[in-house]
Image (cartoon, grey):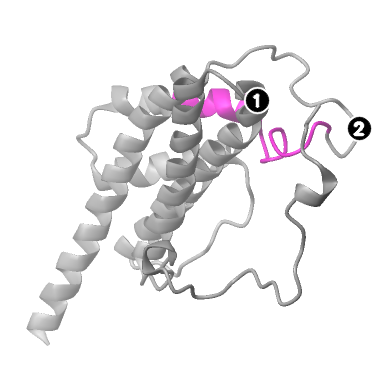
Amino acid sequence: MSNTKPEELPWPQPGDQLFVVGQDAENNAWLKWRGDERWAAYAEGYKKAADILVQRVQDTASDQDFLVYPVCFLYRHYLELRLKSLIMVGQQLRRKNLQFPKHHEVWKLWRESRAVLEQTWPDGPKIDLDNVEACIREFADVDRSSITFRYPSAKDGKENLSNVTHISLRNLSQVMGRLASLLDCAFDGMSEMLCIRGQAEDYLR
């Protein structure tokens, strides 16, 4: 039980606002990313947040039973954003009309993303993609549509994570870091291809 007295609790104040520009510039987040940078910023933000929470658990050896849920959700949302960004930059490279994937199923997003990666680098090592695929398959089996780590039960009332008893946050973070290395490099590489193509077309005009 907390020893905090009611009068010592922080309490809503008149004039409180959530989204303002503060006087301390180092605490002001800048949101005006452009183009593909916006996708990178969103994806990286969720992964960084998860990494920070895992590091806190490692530093303090505490709160892992509570932080596991936001950590897993944040990593999963990073995957969803990164896969969607790969699909869309792939569409741009192939001069297709942009079609934003509106669902949250990481397995379907991965299958489409893998096709994009194999088209972009047809001679790339398939074993690397197989290794990524195995992990995304595992994530999809645990959380198919981004609900499992957000709510204790599904819409039908069935208990989420009923067959999972423990998750090593250290291992999760390490494996996600390796997945992110490949996926982020692929996104950066395709974005650079787009940039070079745009510069060449501007030069030829």
The region drawn magenta spans 133-153
Nearer to us in this view, 87 or 32: 32
Residue assigned mark 1: 142
- The residue sitting at the right extreme is 157
- Dot 1: few (<14), some (14–19), or many (≥20) neighbours within 10 Å? some
Q: Position of residue 173 (x, y in %)?
A: 44, 26
Q: Secondary structure under badge 2?
A: loop
Q: Is residue 42 visible?
A: yes
The residue lying at 55 percent from left, 75 percent from top is: 20
Q: Secondary structure under badge 1?
A: helix
Instruction: Work out how far the residue at label 2 is from the one at label 1, CA to CA, in angstroms.
Output: 17 Å
138 drawn magenta: yes
163 displayed left or right of 138: right
Nearer to us in this view, 123 or 7: 7
So how many labels did they put on this image? 2
The residue lying at 24 percent from left, 39 percent from top is: 122
Q: Examine the image and state in which quarter residue 155 appears.
A: top right
Nearer to us in this view, 45 or 162: 45
Q: Earlier in the sequence, mark 2 or mark 1?
A: 1
Q: Is residue 112 visible?
A: no
Q: Is residue 52 above or below residue 195?
A: above
Q: Mark 1 belongs to which amino acid?
A: Val
Residue assigned mark 2: 157
Q: Mark 2 belongs to which amino acid?
A: Gly
Q: Is residue 11 above or below residue 56?
A: below
